[in-house]
Image (cartoon, rainbow, N blue to C red):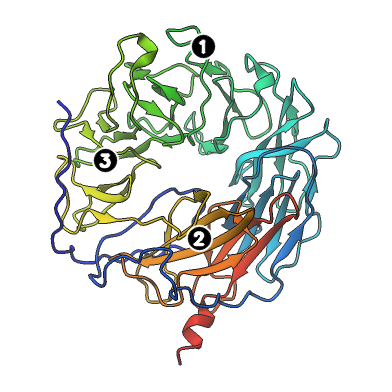
Amino acid sequence: MARTPRRTFVRPAQPIALIVLGVAGLCLWITAGRAGAAPIKDGMPGTIPHAPPYISGFPIPFYRTTDYRTRQGSVAAADIDRDGSIELVVAVPTGLVSVIRSDGSRPAGWPRNFEAFPQPAYPVGAPAVGDLDGDGLAEIVGCITAGPAPARSFMYAFRADGRDETGWPLEIRDAGDASTGCSEAATVLADLNGDGRREIIRAMSGGAVMAWYGDGRKMPGWPYSMGPDGFGRTRPINPDPTVADLDGDGREEVVLVESGATARLAAIEGSGRAARGYPVQLAEVVDHQSTAVGDLDGDGRPELIQATVPFDGSLDGTGGLVPASLHVMRVDGSALPGWPMTLQTGAPWGALLTDLDRDGRPEILQQDGDLLYGFDPLGTVLPGFPYPVHRDFVKSQGLYASCWVAGDADGDSWPDLVQARSNLYNGGNTLRLVALRAGGQALKGFPFDVTGWAAASNPVLADLTADGVNDLVLLVDAGTGGGFSLVAWDLGALLRGNK
């Protein structure tokens, strides 16, 4: 029977350090500790200081197209050419992928656009960055949707120098209803066959999941599809897939969940078949809540953690509210004792796992509406949790909050939390950058507002200035009247200004 978490506040746990160079595509990653002031509340007059200065060479503008396409791009920080410095991999919805050095310059061969494909052609979902061919250099691989309806779908793979990887690009022709194009999920890499090299995994909006070797050959047994649901409909797969070795055989499985009511969760083996016991049927709704995987109880085998949102139950004609839940399952799909946990409002993002008490086992962190919870493997609320997550502006007609990301944003080796919030009011955009210490108090210099922009990616923390302090990077959108820009704020300047 599902349980409801307790609504109590207790003394914060002892802090635990977490240092992150750069984080991309994470929806919530947090560490408990550092008791302090109550969490900040957005929209209080007089609380918004001036923004930190931009890093030299930023912002970097990108053109804007006039046709309709997604407004969400992505940014990742990685040393793709092994030169010891950080590069930024940027996918811009206007139709290009670029590599940007930490000083704002572009290496030779970049950016890459998709003008040779049917138009409009643009990247969808975050690309994967990793070594596909074993040469030690990273490739950038992702999906584009191209052409008018019915759209076509293509996969690209670029080398660190901007050239096409051998065997790429390729058109996706065997994904069932391929005209639906790429899903909103990220492209991911996994070692499916245990050979030490990574294969490419891509979910499609029509519900198919594709897999290729690094040279572009399709893996045997793929694509995988859960098939139509009980009402004869195929479901998109919008949450990012997760990869993990579920059975300890040295080969990774792909764990993913479809979007929609009464969603199905699947674990897919390298052969392209569902693992035994899958897919697992959920009673609630899944939107973009990815599945988390980790060994919670220390038995050497991972558990699967899936967050959901409520469902009114009308699809099957029975009606009645099905509350949101946080599921914890063994690898065979059975529920761990004490789970699922009933959520009050529902999960805006999936669960995140981290070891808060240094016992070698991760705890579960889950946002539930305006509260952030921490749970142990038995479902008990951890000391220091829950605490509020405020997202309101004084005046707002529309609000979009990015995923939370975590990293050291002030050079003290403690984890901090960063989120970008985009507010639409009276036809204009305001971008607010919020940073909290793990205990919930505001980081000095935050929040700050920038008018005229909205977030078009998750924030990324990376030390571009090599001063020992991570900087804040974000792709922003100026709306229909302007283009995209890559911005990078010098967070080290906040510390230097205090000396």
Say which amino acid is labelled 1: Arg
Q: Nearer the viewer, residue 92 or 157?
A: 92
Would you say 396 lies left or right of 266 here?
Answer: right
Give me the residue at 76% from left, 50% from top.
Answer: 162
Q: Residues within 10 Å of mark 2 (few under 14, many from 20)?
A: many
Residue type of the residue flagged with mark 2: Gly
Q: Residue at x 59, y 24 (%)?
A: 205
CA–CA distance between discs 3 and 2? 24 Å
Q: Residues within 10 Å of mark 3 (few under 14, many from 20)?
A: some
Q: Amino acid at mark 3?
A: Asp
**First in sequence: mark 1 or mark 3?**
1
Residue 344 x, y percent position in the rendering: 25, 38
Q: Nearer the viewer, residue 498 or 86?
A: 498
Q: Secondary structure at mark 3?
A: loop
Characterize the local packing of mark 1: few (<14), some (14-19) or many (20 or more) Cα atoms within 10 angstroms. few
Q: Earlier in the sequence, mark 3 or mark 2?
A: 2
Gap in angstroms between the C-alphas marked 1 and 2: 39 Å
Q: Marks 1 and 3, Cα distance to the nearest angstrom?
A: 34 Å
- Give the position of the C terminus as an image quadrant: bottom left
The disc, 1 or 2, on the residue closer to the chain's N-terminal end is 2
Q: Nearer the viewer, mark 1 or mark 3?
A: 1
The label number, if any, that marks residue 371 in the structure image:
none
The answer to whether residue 326 is above or below residue 140 is: above
Q: Which mark is residue 233?
A: 1
**Disc 3: which residue:** 295
Q: Which residue sits at x=49%, y=30%? A: 192
Against 60, residue 186 (above or below) is: above
- Dot 2 falls on a residue whose secondary structure is loop
**Which residue lies under the disc numbered 2?**
22
